């Protein structure tokens, strides 16, 4: 089985998680933390800059599960490749099962790192952001390097 580790923000993650089919493969599902609104004002977009480079040729899935003002359910995910030679996440697929909010954008920072943008309410909101990789794309050390709030859903980093 996997071993428990704590990332730079102090969140526990199990890496690698082993599954057994016809042959052993590994993957990880990392909890990147509970993210809430910055509080007050119009800065309702949280930009989470990761330590994941834009050219790593990794297929990655980010999933957000939480809640939004007025009891809205947030549950969505985005999957894409960090494909070498592209200037934005390659072949993205954003799927929403909830009502609103959550992951609303994703882009590469000016220093070539993946940025995930969460839409939040100025009050009463939050949820968990997970990162999943596996098989030939396993990456067991993805973390949030820094974050910032903004009234824009792009271009902070």
Image (cartoon, rainbow, N blue to C red):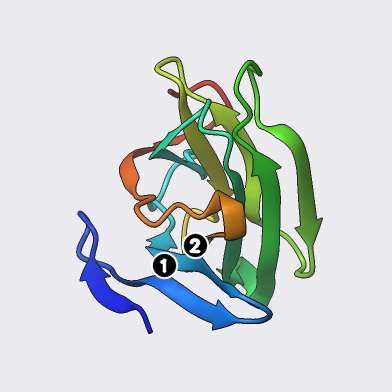
- Camera-side residue of 117 and 119: 117
Query: What is the x, y in percent for residue 36?
Result: 42, 61
Q: Whole-percent x and y of residue 62?
A: 58, 56
Asked where in the image residue 72 lies, by quadrant, the reply is bottom right
Q: Is residue 128 visible?
A: no
Q: Residue at x 65, y 72 (%)?
A: 70
User: Which residue position holds label 1?
Assistant: 31
The vertical placement of 96 against 141, above or below, is: below
Q: Quadrant of residue 73?
A: bottom right
Query: Quadrant location of the N terminus?
Result: bottom left
Compute the Cα span from label 2 to label 1. Answer: 6 Å
Q: Indicate the secondary structure of the residue bearing disc 2.
A: strand
Q: 10 Å neighbourhood of mark 1: few (<14), some, or many (≥20)?
A: many
Q: Quadrant of the C terminus?
A: top left
Residue 46: give x, y in percent of width and height. 47, 44
**Residue drawn 55% across the image and 80% down it:** 19
Front-lying residue, 35 or 20: 20
Whether residue 53 is visible: yes
Rendered image: mark on residue 70: none
22, 102: nearer the viewer? 22
Q: Residue at x 76, y 50 (%)?
A: 94
Question: Which badge, 2 or 1, is on the more N-terminal residue?
Answer: 1
Q: Mark 2–mark 1 contact, CB under 8 Å?
A: yes
Q: Residues within 10 Å of mark 2 (few under 14, many from 20)?
A: many
In the picture provided, is 22 more to the left or to the right than 35?
right
Residue behind mark 2 = 129
Q: Position of residue 78 (x, y in %)?
A: 69, 51
- The answer to whether 57 is drawn above or below residue 29 in the figure is above
157 relative to 85 in the view: left or right: left
Q: Residue at x 20, y 64 (%)?
A: 10
């Amino acid at each position: 089985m996997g071993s428990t580790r704590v990332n730079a923000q102090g969140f526990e993650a199990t890496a690698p998680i082993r599954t057994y089919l016809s042959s052993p493969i590994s993957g990880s599902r990392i909890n990147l933390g509970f993210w809430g609104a910055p509080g007050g004002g119009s800065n309702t977009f949280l930009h989470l800059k990761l330590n994941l480079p834009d050219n790593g040729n990794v297929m990655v899935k980010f999933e957000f599960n939480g809640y939004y003002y007025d009891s809205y359910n947030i549950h969505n995910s985005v999957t894409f490749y960090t494909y070498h030679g592209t200037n934005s996440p390659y072949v993205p697929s954003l799927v929403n099962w909830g009502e609103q909010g959550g992951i609303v954008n994703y882009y590469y920072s000016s220093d070539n790192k993946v940025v995930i943008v969460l839409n939040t309410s100025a009050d009463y909101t939050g949820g968990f952001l997970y990162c999943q990789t596996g098989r030939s794309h396993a990456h067991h050390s993805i973390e949030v390097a820094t974050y910032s709030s903004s009234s824009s859903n792009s271009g902070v980093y």
